[in-house]
Amino acid sequence: MPVFYGTEVASPLMLGTAGYPSPRILADAFRASGAGIATVSLRREAGGGQDFLRLVEGLGVRLLPNTAGCHTAREAVTTAHMARELLGTDWIKLEVIGHADLLAPDVFQLVEAARALSGDGFKVFPYCTEDLSVCDRLLDAGCEVLMPWGAPIGSGLGLNNLHGLRALRAAHPDVPMVIDAGIGLPSHAAAAMEMGFDAVLLNTAVARAGDPVAMAGAMAQAIRAGAAARAADPMEPREMAVPSTPVLGKAFLS
Amino acid sequence: MKLTINGEPREVAVNDEAATVADALDALGLGDARVATALNGAFVPAPSRADAALSPGDAMEIVAPMQGG
């Protein structure tokens, strides 16, 4: 199981808490997923926050607050401090958004916020691109986990840049890495695990499925299969056919 | 005191002379709620709320954990 900042979590599946048809379906989806970590946001208290807190604290999983919607390092740092106080955790999923349509990370502000938060004792989980130099800077800034996107948040497009993700995985084999965002199908999640990523963080693919609870179970199975395949050392693909049935001993029939 | 609470202008029933973030939370019925606060964009940790003085026109943010991905 993945180890983040010295803490082993119960599952390589990390699940978001947004967009479910009802609180009951959210809770059932978490049970079906076996997720070890739930992400939450911080939003203005308008009456529902206390009930939601009871709901997520009753899931029996570790909570990972995010800084979703922050567009500057300053906003993200302030949000992280509020989250740490509220939830009693120094873990923070650091999002600094640079582009409204793609919800792409602003990698410059991200590195700045990661450095400030690491200095303040936070354990930072940065939502980042797969760019190697950005990831190197995040590691220099004190991050011990990287969370490259597969595709834009909520897009369900899967793993957009296989080459870039492979290169990142190979460059830092010992850094725990989570594919965060873009997963739409169990096959995407399985592919991420087959490539050697340590975990997958997803939300919309489950919450917006016609049957979120069934999809949560399907994701759990795919992630288990992907991780098992990685551990089993998959064969190398090749360009030409190689007969799997032995040629020797074939009857001469023409 | 006229304050901006979570982006909305509000008249909050606190003492104009000596009000604090803690007083405003009490007046809003959130004295016991699990929330985090910021005053004019800066985080106010819970132990500092009783010392964080308010002035008319201040902007206070009161947040709680919510749905997120």
Image: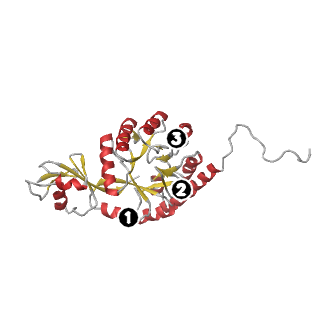
| Measured Cα–Cα span from mark 2 to mark 3 | 19 Å
Camera sees residue A72 = no
Question: Looking at the image, is B19 positioned above or below residue A167?
Answer: below
Marked residue nearer the N-terminal end (2 or 3): 3
Q: Look at discs 1 and 2 and give the one toward the viewer.
A: 1
Disc 2 marks which amino acid? Met
Quadrant (top left/top right/bottom left/bottom right) for the N terminus of chain A: bottom right
Percent coordinates x, y for residue A75 in the rendering: 30, 44
The residue where tag 3 is placed is A160
Residue drawn at 60 percent across, 47 percent down:
A194
Residue drawn at 40 percent across, 42 percent down:
A103
Percent coordinates x, y for residue B54 in the rendering: 14, 51
User: For residue A49, what is the image quadrant?
Assistant: bottom left
Residue drawn at 87 percent across, 45 percent down:
A248
The residue where tag 2 is placed is A219
Marked residue nearer the N-terminal end (1 or 3): 1
Q: Horizontally, is A254 left or right of B17 in the view?
A: right
